[in-house]
Image: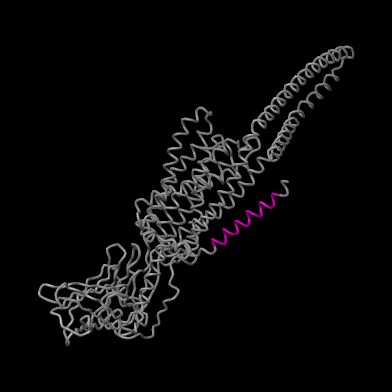
Amino acid sequence: MTQTIAPRLRTLVLLLLAAACALLAGAGPASAHAALTGSDPREGAVVDKAPAQVSLTFSESVSMDDDSLRVLDPRGKRVDDGKPSGTGGATYSVKLHAGLPDGTYTVTYQVVSADSHPVAGAYTFSVGAPSETSVAVSGQSAGGGFVGGLYGVGRYVSYTGFAVLVGGAAFVLACWPRGSGVRVLQRVVVSGWLALTAATLLLLLLRGSYTGSGKFADVFDLNLLGEVLQTKPGAALVSRLLLLAAAALFIAVLFGAYDKREDEEKRDLTFGLAVGGSVVAAGLAATWAMSEHASVGLQAGLAMPVDVVHLIAVATWLGGLTALLVALYRGPADTPVPALAVRRFSRVAFGSVIALVVTGTYQSWRQLGSWTAFTDTRYGQLLLVKIGLVAVLVGVAHFSRRWTAQLAEAAPAVAGAAAARRAEKRAGKASTKAGTKASGTASAKAGTKASGNAKVAQKASGTTKGSGTAKGTGTAKGSGGSPRAAQLARQRAAVDAARQKRQRDADPNRFGLRRSVLAEAGIAVVLLVVTTVLTQTEPGRTEEEAKAAGGSSAAASAPSTGAVTLDMPFDTGAQNGKGVVRVELDPARVGANDMHLYVERPDGTAFDLPEVKVALTQKAKSIGPLPVAPDHITTGHWSASGVQIPMAGDWEVAVTVRTSDIDQVTISKNTQIG
């Protein structure tokens, strides 16, 4: 049975690893987490005269240097002063040279978003009329190339190392204290520490090139490294290294002084290690929370501690699962994982799942913002995959719990059999020892008697040859007996260990538990990869904001061919105070427009009013009210030319009409402009 199922399990794990590799291959460079939501001039705009500056607005705060924002003329020559100005928030601007000629200009930008990811892009606008340009705006990307690939690998390794380090140590401390003396578990936890430390050093060295030029040679630029240390991500990586030094001390105590103490003495040290380890684990998780998604956007003060809890729950579950799997498959035969330890881990894993569901629900709401983002954005689609994997993992864990219960029920019988075998072994050793002693005594007596006879014979013959021969024989036996006994002892120990391993692996309950835990570990590998890809993917809320901004920009740049007509009835409450105001706006697009107002009585005849005023407001962007004072043209007709509409969108047109010195009313209606 074991030989039949084991290949299937290996095939399952290989398939899951292949799926993980496919996700890694499809992840690509980190997506932009700060989206360009506005610009002045806007993308594709044609302005009458050259602007004094170019301004960009992002969905979250970004950081810039002198080369982050550039404006190029049609020949590719810079026409900006190279010093972007801003308040350190989401809007930056750069001044342009005076007297720029007509033509198409290219705006390029490469910034670092507040959640540590590089953002790059480009667009064009024209002065006077569009023209040919030698500047290519396609292929603008950041965080790609060889350096970007290395940085991505470093991120995957760092998350994996954190999970193995925290989860493995938690498994030993909370579930199986005697496991601190098991060599394979020590290797698992130390490997997690080494992986996280190496990945953190790699990320620190690559950071400057990753967010800048992307050249591998810049990895060794000490000046660039100094600039990285002054940024929030750089400070987080340095803090992580300092916390890893504390983690090394924790590991030394866990597998040193803690392992050497007796069970009763371990209780006092367990509390101290639990508190210290929790503080170090929370600090390590905070280095991600304080520099990535959780540190920006909505409710950052709440999102960061929630993210810390989420990361620790993931590490405790998946890292502990890794430690359990290694102990089940690679642990020594004379120290099998007890059912009590598996049952304890089952409870710890269940608590971790509850924490994941609660914190994950909050994070999903915060990063998506709408139900449609689940299916319309890449972040939402990956999140659905993660939710599905968690559900499958919980289902497989249910079978592990069943095997654990059966293993616990069989544990007393197994323990009794093991005790009987140990008693039988001790009895056999005692019997052998007694037999050896008796045999030795008899041999000694026989030897003494023979020696006496030999001496008598020697005296009779007057020679000592027999004595010399006896001594030589005794020396030969004594010198050859000790190595042979040691070799036999080693062979017996190897045979006993092999027999114990066969007996352990033949236990159907333990075999079933190993199968289910192996399946859990395979799914956990894919889950960890998806989680890491999520941290590099643009949140759904930001992606939808960028799409909306792009749609508004496209609508604004497309000229409208028809006028907007609004009929608004009014009643001032006075005699002859009723009528209808018709407002016509032509061409109803961003820029200059002509406005005409016609006032009619209910019977359709035109009549004059003492005063007519108009105001335009876009409440969504807090623009306005923008007053318009039309000129009286003829009876019932007012007009205004050059009415400027600064932005496309839903505008409120409010008209105030006065029919007497004291009777007036304001009426309004919304319309889409642009």
**Residue 397 vs residue 33, the one in the foreground:** 397
In the image, residue 634 sits, relative to residue 366, either above or below, namely below
Q: How is the image coloured?
A: one colour
User: Is residue 306 placed above or below 127 in the rendered structure?
Assistant: above
Q: Position of residue 129 (x, y in %)?
A: 33, 86
Q: Residue 489, relative to residue 15: is it above or below?
A: above
Q: Quadrant of residue 649?
A: bottom left
In the depicted structure, whether residue 154 falls above or below residue 593? above
Residue nearest the observer in this picture, 20 or 98: 20
Q: Is residue 40 left or right of residue 490?
A: left
Residue at 44 percent of width and 45 percent of height:
281
Total numbered circles: 0
Of residue 614 and residue 179, the one placed in the foreground of this image is: 614
In the displayed structure image, the side of residue 218 where residue 55 appears, left or right = left
Q: Quadrant of residue 124?
A: bottom left
In the image, farthest residue toward the bottom: 634
Residue 18 magenta: yes
Residue farthest along the right direction in this orientation = 461
Quadrant position of residue 233: bottom left
Residue 592 position, x and y percent, is: 26, 82
Expressed as whole percent of the image width and height from the top left, the position of residue 287 reads 41, 51
Q: Which residues are magenta?
A: 5-24
Please report the residue visible at 61 percent of the width from the left and 50 percent of the height from the top: 519
- Quarter the C terminus occupies: bottom left
Residue placed most toward the observer, 481 or 556: 556
Q: x, y percentage for residue 86?
A: 28, 65
In reply to whether residue 569 is colored magenta, the answer given is no
Task: Tell me what residue is drawn at x 34 percent, y 51 percent.
Answer: 301
Secondary structure of the magenta portion, mostly?
Answer: helix
